[in-house]
Amino acid sequence: MTKGLLRVFTAGSVDDGKSTLIGRLLYDTKSIYEDQYESIKASSELRGEENVNLALLTDGLRAEREQGITIDVAYRYFSTPQRKFIIADTPGHIQYTRNMVTGSSNADLAIIMVDARNGITEQTRRHTLITSLIGIKHIVVCVNKMDIVDFKREVFEKIRHEFQSFSSTLEVANVQFIPVSALSGDNVVHKSEKIAWYKGETLLEYLENVNATNDENRLDFRFPVQYVIRPQSKEYHDYRGYAGIVASGVIKKGDTVTALPSGFSSKIKSIETYDGPIEGVVSGMSVTILLEDDIDISRGDILVRENNRPITEQNIDLMICWLNERKLAIGSRYAIKHTTKDLKGIVKDVQYKINIDTLQQVEDDKEIGLNDVGRISIRTTSPLFFDSYLKNRNTGSLILIDETTNETVGAGMIV
Amino acid sequence: MRSKNSHLNTLESESIYILREVAAQFEKTALLFSGGKDSIVLSHLARKAFWPAKIPFPLLHIDTGHNFPETIRYRDDWVKKIDARLIVKYVQDSIDKGRVKEEKGYNASRNLLQTVTLLDAIEELKLDAAIGGARRDEEKARAKERFFSHRDEFGQWNPKDQRPELWNLFNGRKNIGEHFRVFPLSNWTELDVWQYIKEENIPIPSIYYSHPRECINRDGQLISMSDFLLAKETEEIGSYTVRFRTIGDMSCTGAVISNASNIDEVIEEISVSRVTERGTRSDDKRSEAAMEDRKKAGYF
């Protein structure tokens, strides 16, 4: 049996070889098609490059190819007999950190690239911090370009040590280190003969075997109502179905649920899909729920179990990743999206900003600008029904939107 | 019923979530329908997302006039079957009105002209969202797309400055005159689409299966003979056993030699194929960034 889908993203500084690594992974698993290979081969020759540049597989935009950098996330798909993978190749440039955040937010696992010659850089620290804030439970640190440092074990051990000491304060469950050369393929798919001192798994072996399926919250049933289905046809005259995706937990027909904010409870009459009714449903499935009683429920409301309710609060503390050139300002109002609910909020305070180099909390620096990370307090126009982000990614996350530009300016993780 | 752990369940749920999000966030939506397998799967998912209600938006076909006749027959049957409303806008009308000029010569195609007809339709119908079946695995510029992709008032895509898209929180806010392109099949691969068609038993146009056809071989592409194709004197017409891996205009979609005459054989063929499906599309081959350039201008 296959292990299903694994969502992975790459992070690290510019030129650490993220795109090349993905190219290598695809090439060595025979996931590159002949016409794609011919096309990047021709492009590499046109550019006067010596070898076929595998990074061109993901750097698909004209501007990216011109500059040899990744600007926005590119998604790649491949499968092995064990698993199906979605890989987001995210930019290393500090300027495009917001796109790295985009690529990481739905991932199960991060591949953090470190150039063996340069060791840990500011971007390595920034990306590792964001990875831990986003709640990624598994990190693989690929120490890349081992070929240039003569495959020396000391170089690898030094970087491993450095990474462990700076990341010890961060919350990441599982960190692995693998010495690789993306350019020559050592330890990516095939075991390297030149790195005989490394006895662990290759990157692909690790990706195939890692157990990332138990990371979902199966305890707390949360069903944000996304859309109310009312056919208003003869056959389905009184039909009122609450459509949505189960954010977490499980529920079955006959269970009692409470709708928030109204607080009314009812029993689940049926759980429906186009393919017919089902007995029970788990997180991640899109379904339509019908209740026995006629209570007023609309988009933005949430169905939960009577005795397992989310936190209800208007004053909320969150960790914020700032994604816009316009700085966050205390006293400013923003539009907020949280689950299927739209509301507004005002920034009451910046508690601290995180110093990327030391990972220390800096309390006297309240200026949160592009790519900064900090902890803020907001007050919302109406009560929010949420869980802490650590417990529940789906009910603990929100975005801030600048109402004058409509841009998404902040990624918030409720503390 | 497929196994509970199938990744197709995950993809289906994700796509249904996106479709419902579109219906909830936008006022006037259309689903761009070409009669190709991706837009067929997309409209099937839309049926599922809103059942037992009807799909709350129409299908919009931008008709180049260069269709395979099988596609049009299929389209009309399918629309009835899923109880949807169909709007057709014709590239010929854009040509007659002088909005676009027909390309001339052997490689003439109406592919580029569609963009104008599409943008005109979006304006005329006052659409604030157009749902498309494009997938990220198809092409390198499409690999960069968001699910909710913002378009400015000229219908243009700005790939260098896309909105962040976090978790499953989709920001569809926009100013008047702007719109969104939404791609619920972003994470599907070609093989996923075919496996889904099989598991869901979805009918598809007959030209996806092996059949005899008169073609010419132009630059390695087998192009079907039709009224829309100007063959050079040196080009020999031959009879081939082919099928189509993608369906676009007759004049720019290449056929592949194939004996795959049912869904299992098609899946078998795709699984071992060493070329991408867009490899059969001469519209992608005009330059290295042909898709990016067309997308920036407002193409599908």
Image (tube, rainbow, N blue to C red):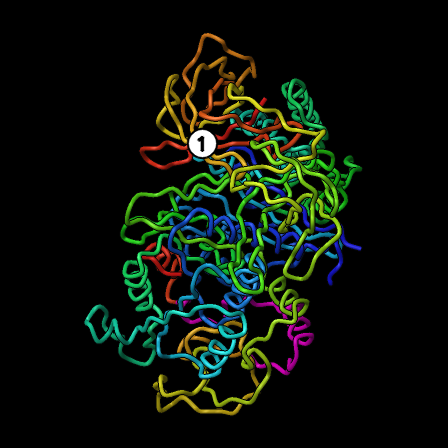
View extreme (top): residue: A364
- The one nearer the camera, B136 or A78, is B136
User: Percent from the top left, x then y, of residue A266?
Assistant: 67, 40
Compared with residue A215, is residue A119 higher up or lower down, i.e. above or below? above
Compared with residue A282, is residue B257 higher up or lower down, i.e. above or below? below
Q: Circle 1 marks a residue in which chain?
A: A
User: Percent from the top left, x then y, of residue B230?
Assistant: 34, 86
Residue B259: say if magenta: yes
Q: Which residue is mark 1?
A: A343
- The one nearer the camera, A264 or B165, is A264
User: Percent from the top left, x then y, of residue A271?
Assistant: 68, 51
Residue B292: say if magenta: no
Q: Amino acid at mark 1?
A: Leu
View extreme (left): residue: B98
Compared with residue A403, is residue A292 higher up or lower down, i.e. above or below? below
Q: Residue at x 46, y 48 (%)?
A: B24
Q: Quadrant of the N terminus of chain A?
A: bottom right
Q: Residue at x 78, y 35 (%)?
A: A197
Q: Can see residue B193?
A: yes
Q: Can see residue A94?
A: no
User: Percent from the top left, x then y, of residue B258?
Assistant: 60, 81
Looking at the rendering, the stretch of residues picked out in magenta corresponds to: B256-285
Q: Residue at x 20, y 72 (%)?
A: B97
The image quarter containing residue A413 is top right
Q: Is residue B51 left or right of residue B235?
A: right
